Image (cartoon, rainbow, N blue to C red):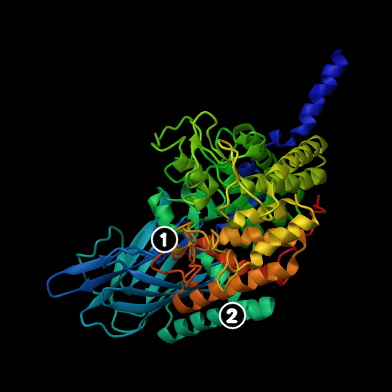
Amino acid sequence: MASRILLFCLSLLLALPALAGPPVRERPAYRRIQDNLQRGWNTWHSPSVLTQVLLPEGFALNLGFKQHYWLEERHLGEALIGRRQEGAERIRPGLHAMDGSFTSLTLHWEELAATIRTAHAGDDLVVLIEPMSPSKNRIKLVLETAMLWNRPGHLLRDGEALVARLANREIRVFTTGRHVDDPYVPTRTPYLALPLEGPLAISTGKPRTLAEVTDLVTRAEARLAEQARAKYGDLDQAWLAVTSGIAWNTIYEPKHDRVVSTVGRLWNAEYGGYCLFGWDNFFLAYMTALDSRDLAFANIIEHLHGKTDEGFIPNDNRGNDSKSFDRSQPPVGGIMVREIVKKYPERWFLEAVFDDLLGWNRWWMRKRLNEGLLSYGSHQAPNPFHEPATRSKRTAGYESGMDDSPMYIDVPFNAEKNTLELQDVGLTSLVIADCRALAEMATLLGRDAERRELLDRAQRLTRAMDALWHEETGFYLNRRTDTGEFSFRLSPTLFYPLLADVADKGRSRKILDHFYDEREFAGDWILPSIARNDPTFPKQRYWRGAIWPPLNWLTYLAFHRAGFTDSARELADKSLHMFLAQWRDKGFVSENYSAITGTGDDARLSSDRFHSWGSLFGVMALVEAGHMPAPGAPLEKVAP
């Protein structure tokens, strides 16, 4: 008897290898990743895209501007992309290399219209500011120094230079302008006030002429373009747009000492310093895997670090320490990690993330199972921040990631079940796909018990999905659990059964037919978030008809999984065309686009015009060209 108990205990220990050793964020392999990421000059500081920060020291140079009028003076100390308030700065983002080796933007504020380009010159930073037209009244550049996040250092102005004395080195900052005394500049650290009467250059390390700085930034821009052409050929513009869409929103986050990609700086400002969203950040991790193993791994590990005590990834995870303790978001983590590991097949990483993903997968079955299938929901949970709207239809909609989707109109929330009264085809399919992805990982890790558990769960849900098949419509349809009726509101989430591999060839073909039906999803601008013949489609506001990146992306993966490669390519091509047209025309990487006009600023939309996951519209074409492993291919190996 004692021997059997001992064997049982040993089997438990072997089944839970992730419990041994230090937490993931403290492991040497991961600390090396963050150390590699936290180096050099970049736009690390979330509150302003006009701040360049040197890591790891935290020394910052901030570009501010002062507008003089006959009666008053105005000061711009921080600037963000996408602000819409009256009188706010307007920034058109340009190219941004992930490592900060080149950035460009156009700034409009008050009478100022200027292009600002930055580049690396070895370990030095150079900045070129070029007014686009003369201003009627005087404008000054306020070049301000800072030591961010309470990092040690000593700052001073030394004549026409700024000096930072850091722990291991001294940084001197020079300009081609002339400092003028201005005691009314609203700064609290050493600065230079420089009349902006023409092009002006800034350089660290040593003085450089305007011509030298111009040459450096011009050559840095050319190198970035050459790098894009050499690696991506005809898709160079797609890669540059995708990369820039993410790079402008990749920051150093000081509370947890990490470099991480975020959905957008406006969201970071609103949510207490940073915000990571449930499904968004798994997509961002995948996109950064195009070129950076370190950033892809960091984005996954940091996102999983934000799980709740219940073991699920919250809807949002905020800089003020608040989270969505009552709700998650669509379970795409295992699906995205599977694709990342196919490109970077490292066992330690898979071991580091597997148990968190498995725990989240189990949570769905524990908390959101509704009469044999899954439903989105929201439950009562301890919340030290006293969020008022929980355990409600509204917060269940937030868990879906498609907040106000017409799929949920008139669907009641069951407070006893903590779910919507709707068995959800999309959610159930994603959980099945997550099970299959995690089962592949379990096989490579030798986690046989977990592999069997996951495959059994996938099979049980697949069998249950059969009850949602509607032969006349040729779709798996959402079904009400209060009335037993099918819902005939059609969304791209109904393509997800192809991703879960639950349909036979006959049903799969019928599902695909909807992609080509012009009454529903086909058209120049695809995919609408609700079918074109739905009465809410003309509104185009939020999830009522607009085109959203995750729906296109997951449908693209679904088509590949089902072997519908021509359809996947068409979706990728049309998504890229829409995405690049808006990037070239207006510098948009929009949260969503109009399914009527294909634009990101259609008056009917509710859309952040610079939102990282908008890059998903461009990444599909890069996957098609083979720059990431084929989505339909299995996960076959990991290195020791």
Give the labeled residue for mark 2: 225
Q: Which mark is residue 606?
A: 1
In the figure, 303 relative to 65: above or below?
above
Q: Residue furthest front?
A: 472
Q: CA distance from mark 2 to mark 1?
A: 33 Å
- Of the residues tagged 2 and 1, which is closer to the observer? 1
Question: Which of the two residues, 108 or 180, is positioned nearer the viewer here?
Answer: 108
Q: Is residue 152 visible?
A: no
Q: Residue furthest top?
A: 1
Q: Which mark is residue 210?
A: none
**Does the residue at mark 2 contact the one at mark 1 (Cβ under 8 Å)?**
no
What amino acid does circle 2 point to? Ala
The answer to whether 399 appears left or right of 293 in the picture is: left
> Residue at 40% across / 37% down in the picture?
387
Q: Secondary structure at mark 1?
A: loop
For label 1, count other residues whose C-alpha is less than 10 Å away and answer few (under 14), some (14-19) or many (20+). some
> Residue at 53% across / 61% down in the picture?
548
In the figure, 177 relative to 373: above or below?
below
**Total marks drawn?**
2
Give residue 189's position: percent from left, percent from top. 31, 59
Give residue 327's position: percent from left, percent from top. 52, 39
> Residue at 22% across / 78% down in the picture?
138
Question: Which of the two residues, 193 or 347, is positioned nearer the viewer here?
Answer: 347
Q: Is residue 524 visible?
A: yes
Give residue 587's position: percent from left, percent from top. 46, 73
Q: Which of the 4 quarters of the picture holds residue 573?
A: bottom right
Q: Residue furthest left?
A: 71
Q: Which of the 4 quarters of the picture holds residue 384?
A: top left
